Image (cartoon, grey):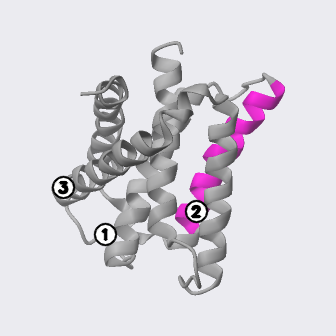
């Protein structure tokens, strides 16, 4: 097991715990969110991180760490919505939402391990602010995909962007958690 895989496995339970607690508080109320709403929620979180990174000011008090965890969790919601579509009312149990969570996080981890191998852990030598910029770029790509009725001509789909966003957010969380 690589250091990155071990660190990933430390971060994910923390994200999962927040997701699970939110399910207890609200249930899967996010099921009514359309793709553009998920993208806008992700945009709000990433834009806030960028503002804190740029200005050094944080008046709301939520940390970059907690915003990155929220980004991971909203991406899982986005992946669910892509797979089964959004609903007009809550149509899923919290238990089913957690099954989807585990499925998509495992897929994100598998993808990260493959890419991390091929890219030689390049993320470790990057500035954390670059993760924020990459996340914002992937969100903008998903907005374009939504505007194009979910179709792309030669590019990966929205799901690939969500998986990349999850992994960039986890890299940011690793940098913070392990003071790297």
x%, y% of residue 87? 36, 77
Of residues 107 and 68, which is closer to you in this image? 107
The residue to which callout 3 is attached is: 99
Q: Earlier in the sequence, mark 2 or mark 3?
A: 2
Q: Is residue 42 magenta?
A: yes
Q: Earlier in the sequence, mark 1 or mark 2?
A: 2
Mark 3 is surrounded, within 10 Å at the Cα level, by few (under 14), some (14 to 19) or many (20 or more) other residues, namely few
Task: Decide: is 130 above or below 99.
Answer: above
At horizontal 31% and vertical 77% (from top left) the residue drawn is: 84
Label 1 with label 3: CB-CB less than 8 Å = no
Image quadrant in which the C terminus is located: top right
The residue to which callout 2 is attached is: 39
Q: Earlier in the sequence, mark 1 or mark 3?
A: 1
For residue 43, side relative to residue 97 (left or right)? right
Q: Quadrant of residue 18?
A: top left
Label 1 with label 2: CB-CB less than 8 Å = no
């Amino acid at each position: 097991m690589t250091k990155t895989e071990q660190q990933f496995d430390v971060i994910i339970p923390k994200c999962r715990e927040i997701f699970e607690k939110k399910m207890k508080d609200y249930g899967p109320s996010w099921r009514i969110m359309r793709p553009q709403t998920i993208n806008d929620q992700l945009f709000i979180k990433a834009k806030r991180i960028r503002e804190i990174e740029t200005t050094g000011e944080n008046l709301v008090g939520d940390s970059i760490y907690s915003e990155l965890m929220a980004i991971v969790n909203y991406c899982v919601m986005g992946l669910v919505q892509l797979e089964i579509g959004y609903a007009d009312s809550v149509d899923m149990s919290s238990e089913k939402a957690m099954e989807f969570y585990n499925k998509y996080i495992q897929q994100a981890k598998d993808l990260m391990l493959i890419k991390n191998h091929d890219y030689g852990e390049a993320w470790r030598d990057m500035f954390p602010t670059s993760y924020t910029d990459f996340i914002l770029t992937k969100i903008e790509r998903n907005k374009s995909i939504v505007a194009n009725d979910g179709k792309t001509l030669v590019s990966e789909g929205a799901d690939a962007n969500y998986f990349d966003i999850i992994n960039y957010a986890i890299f940011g969380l690793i940098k913070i958690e392990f003071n790297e």
